[in-house]
Image: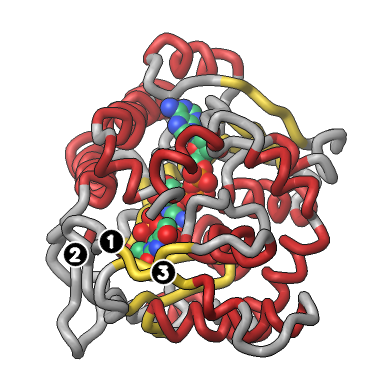
Amino acid sequence: MKKTILITGGAGFIGSHVIRRFVNNYPDYLVVNADKLTYAGNLENLTDIETKKNYLFEKIDIVNKQSVLDLFKKYCFDGIIHLAAESHVDRSITGPDEFVFTNIIGTVNLLNSALNSWKNSPEGKLFYHISTDEVYGSLGKDGLFTEQTAYDPKSPYSASKASSDHMVRAYNHTFGIPVVISNCSNNYGPNQFPEKLIPLAINNIKKNKTFPVYGKWVNILDFLYVEDHASAIDHIFHRGKVGDTYNIGGNNEWKNIDLILLLCRIMDKKLNRPSGTSEKLITYVKDRPGHDLRYAIDSSKLQKELGWSPLPEFADGLEKTVEWYLTNGKWLERVLSGDYGKYYDLMYSGR
Ligand code: NAD
Ligand code: TYD
């Protein structure tokens, strides 16, 4: 094999798309997926590639320093794409501790092991840290997040990701580890855990259950199709400048409520229900504490310097996503029948 690549969090939503892309597109790379398999890790996301010769799975908790050291003793990694994280803002509000452990300490454990393993020959190695646009906080009505925007995280999730970004940059600056970071907007697409807005709404509409849209319905997000994020990660991993940061976004701002209304229209059409049926399931609920008003990303650096561009129009991507969830009902049912059931009842039912 030409290279051995560690991808952390590869059983999760975005990680599984990155693993599939790398395993299929780079047969001469050995791709090692290291994942703890938390509630969000689902190896069923990878059944189509799991028997390929260039793919291996390692169940490890990155918070456990010894496990990370052992992993780096077992393999000589040429590159690391670090996605493993606690990723859901609502969970970071009900229980911030896990976010500190996994997102900050887990990242530092990986940095220490990479430093130790590459100290004699850092050339050609890369520690690629996957982060979020939420580290920049919230925009007003105008403007875009650029790579120069000052960090101003507002939730325990975004604060933990911001801390990990700082540690990655500090290890580059202080110890010379070759790193690159990207900060991406909200992703959507197949295999997303149904606690996030789009799959949650699809699942509830399918079951004729109400679903919540938080607050005053004024929040604006930039949504990116998950395969576009995977392709951006591929571009940055192979062509990104060491030490640099790249913003990734779809140039696709949506007010939550407009997005949900579009989704409702697609669901009515796909389920052959009279138009307006799904819309009646939307419920007004109290806002998420500390809810950021607006995210919008300027990804022109990535587009100009590395030639990346996002593919599907949002309406097409959303329709594709709905089709995936409707034809993969078994995937959804299996996910919902796990521990998630209890959390789902706690957070989303009875509102
Ligand atoms: P996810 O929650 O779907 O998946 C996270 C994965 O990490 C799971 O497979 C989980 O088992 C694994 N994991 C969690 N804790 C671990 C630990 N201690 N040790 C090893 N593995 C562990 O998350 P996602 O939405 O796929 O996000 C992946 C990455 O992308 C995260 O770093 C997130 O911050 C970032 N990101 C996500 C979005 C988004 O919209 N989802 C946008 C920008 C950036
Ligand atoms: P979400 O999908 O939870 O992603 P993240 O964890 O990255 O915030 O939230 C996306 C947006 O949707 C955010 O503005 C909060 C809103 N939202 C709702 O209005 N209702 C919901 O049930 C959820 C889960 C999110």
Q: Which residue is mark 3?
A: 283
CA distance for labels 1 and 3: 25 Å
Q: Which residue is mark 2?
A: 137
179 to 182, vertically: above or below: above
Residue 176 figure quarter:
top left
Marks 3 and 2, the one that precedes in the sequence:
2
Q: Position of residue 56 (x, y in %)?
A: 72, 29
Q: Which residue is mark 1?
A: 134
Numbered disc in front, either 3 or 2: 3
Q: Position of residue 167 (x, y in %)?
A: 22, 40
Residue situated in front as seen by the camera: 149 or 334: 334
Q: Identify the amino acid type marked 1.
A: Glu
Asked if the residues shown at circle 1 and circle 2 are in contact, with their CB atoms under 8 angstroms apart, the answer is yes
Color encoding of the figure: secondary structure
> Considering the numbered disc 2 on the image, is that residue within a helix, a strand or a loop?
loop
Q: Quadrant of the N terminus?
A: top right
Residue 142 figure quarter:
bottom left
Q: Identify the amino acid type marked 2.
A: Gly
At 62% from the left edge and 31% from the top edge, which residue is drawn? 338
Q: Identify the amino acid type marked 3.
A: Thr
Residue situated in front as seen by the camera: 303 or 257: 257
Mark 2: few, some, or many residues within 10 Å (few <14, many ≥20)?
A: many
**Mark on residue 23?**
none
> Considering the numbered disc 3 on the image, is that residue within a helix, a strand or a loop?
strand
Residue situated in front as seen by the camera: 56 or 36: 36
